[in-house]
Amino acid sequence: MPRYQHASYGGESVTLQNNHLRLDVYKRLTGWGWGELSDQSGRFIAVLDHLGELLLRDQEIPMRLEAQSYEQRSVPSGQQLIFHVESLLIKEKLRGTSFENWINYPLTEHAMRGVVTITLDADVPILRLSYRLISQANQYARYVRGPWLKIGQDAFGTQKDDAIFPGVEWLLSDEWSSGTDWFKDPWALRVIPHPNKVAIPLMALSYQQTGIGLAWDPNTVVSQWFNTRQQNPQPVFASPNFVDRRNNHLFGLMIPSVDVESHENAIWADPPLELHPEQRIDFDAEVFLTGGDSLSVVVNWIQRHGLPQPQARWPLPDALDRIARAYDTRFWRDGEGFGNAQRSNGFHPSAPRFLDDYLKRDPESPLALSLRRKLDWCRTQPGFREAPRSNRLRGNRDELLKQGRQLAGYQREDGSFPFDPDGRHWVKDDFVVAREYLEPMGKAHDTALDISITPVIELLTLAEATGEDAFRQAAHRALDYCLPLKRPEGGDFWETPLHSPNLLAAGHAAVAYELGYRAFNDERYRAQAIHWIRSLLPFTHLWQPRNLPMLYNTKPCLCASDWYFANWVRDHVQWEVLETFAQSLHFGIDWSTIDPDIDWRRVQEGVTTAALRWMIDHTEDNWRPHNLPDTLPAYQAGLMDDLFADTHNTTTGNYGGAGIMPDVIAVNILGLLNQRAAG
């Protein structure tokens, strides 16, 4: 007997089953069907609510697509069920009832027909769904729904361990998607986001160490008529399912797809979708199960589908030379040093962190000789600055001991470090402004992954330099404190909600736990290092629209700056993931060796070559400042060329924010070239 309580059972069922997954498809009183998905232990996981659904503009009642019979057959890949479906005729269903005399829907023919094929792979827990639907008339649709998966329905309900909608949501426990934990309205609502905002075409949820995913190809053309725009699969994600207001979680695909941000989150399209006779509507998707959490679902998808080939704007050696030439020309000012023209005090006697290694490649070239002279001059100046974010220790042993003792002094007995927004964590006044005009983004004395794990890197480095065991033990306590944490949080604490999902925190934790593994030979730390480096993946674009390059662009976090001033579901930031790989290079961490199930060298190459797209070229006129509006003339004069932009808009393709010095790109290029040379 079926377990789904919201369908009228017609007394027949058919099953697809292998050693990992079971799908029971049931016949309603009106036709096949709906499906119930169970795992290898027989635990009920999810309901496939229908075989398609159509809502027309002039008929309030949705029409399911149902079949009167089915075919079952074996194919080389596994087992298959084939349903020849037709949309319900509401007029027929009302005939002979009390409604017939006062409700008269004019449709006397099926509005849509087609074939739905469900294939269960032979040896893996993957269901492949194919919808080949055909409009039968000129008509206007509020929506056409394809796969519509209700997870937990009549089973575990709204419970979950976690859920990931890459680039959009990372939820724990009873957190709501589209919640206001890290956004305020109108940005909080993201149940039907612009497809470009989705980093990986996948929705994932886990409960009691079973993960379920729904995946699709976002560049598939679901439908198009010659005089209307292309429709691509539009994801719908609600956890819990506030769309239907039911005790489940919703993963769905539908059309129309969102084309501009102002059309997001529309369950019913207005204006409606124009359909024509013989117009095709094709959905393809896969539903699959894994062991583990939602991150395991993401990793499973990557392992099966592979990582895309990076697309470089220039060959890496040419890009490296281009950056070096920029430092030799527009990023240099005689008598002042290296820098850029964005600010009046933007040049300083400093050491670009890639430069020493770059000069070793071809030390006698004219460019290298010119840069050597500039670097030597900088090092003679009283205000000389070492390379930023280089993890280099400064000072003699007594100074390093003082530095380490001060840092360790912040640690609490449980191993955590407290958040101090008005003290040592003060970077800029965003926190002050946000808590005064609305509410705090984080509470003083609270903690988060990044707040407690970043000191580990410094403490272990100081312990190695000084031999001070107290620093090692402080790092050990912090590592142990963070062991239960599973979602990266806190990395952009200076402008975003403290507990929001964050890429920079994932990178810091990965490096810290790998250094902890080296220091203490604790296998738990190696496992955590792998978990945290994999946590970069849900923030990373592993697809791109055909007309908008964004492959390997990254979201910094899934939240908003200062509650209102930047939307990090819409916008990309690239410097943070570049910093993660640069820091890994500094410590000699090779993630491809540590975690060989993921091609981390390809990921690093991807995010590095993506950053080349971000390098400014004023002739392309695709960058605009938003926080430094007075820099536009410098940009238009070409003085900012070869800086890389702070942000990228997923929906417009435009770049914005401040220009960032490209030395971190060069560091990553050098690391990649050295890896190639080493084989």
Image (cartoon, grey):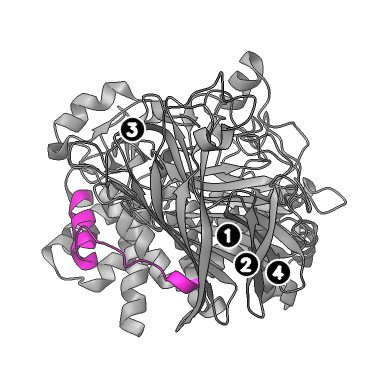
In the rendered image, residue 470, in percent from the top left (x then y), is placed at: 79, 62
Marks 3 and 4 sit apart, C-alpha to C-alpha, by 40 Å
Marks 3 and 2 sit apart, C-alpha to C-alpha, by 38 Å
Residue 667 shows in the view: no
Determine which quarter of the picture holds residue 324: bottom left
Query: Tag 2: residue type?
Result: Leu
Specify whether residue 325 is painted magenta: yes
Q: Nearer the viewer, residue 32 or 239?
A: 32
> Which label was assigned to residue 213?
1
- Residue at screen point 54% across, 55% down: 394
Q: Earlier in the sequence, mark 4 or mark 1?
A: 4
Q: Secondary structure at mark 1?
A: strand
- Residue at screen point 31% across, 22% down: 629
In the rendered image, residue 590, in percent from the top left (x then y), is placed at: 49, 74
What residue is disc 2 on?
289
What residue is disc 3 on?
139
Q: Secondary structure at mark 4?
A: strand
Marks 3 and 1 sit apart, C-alpha to C-alpha, by 33 Å
Where is the C terminus found, in terms of image quarters?
Answer: bottom left
Q: In this picture, which residue range is highlighted in magenta?
A: 303-326
In the rendered image, residue 278, in percent from the top left (x then y), is placed at: 27, 47
Which label sits in the foreground, 2 or 4?
A: 4
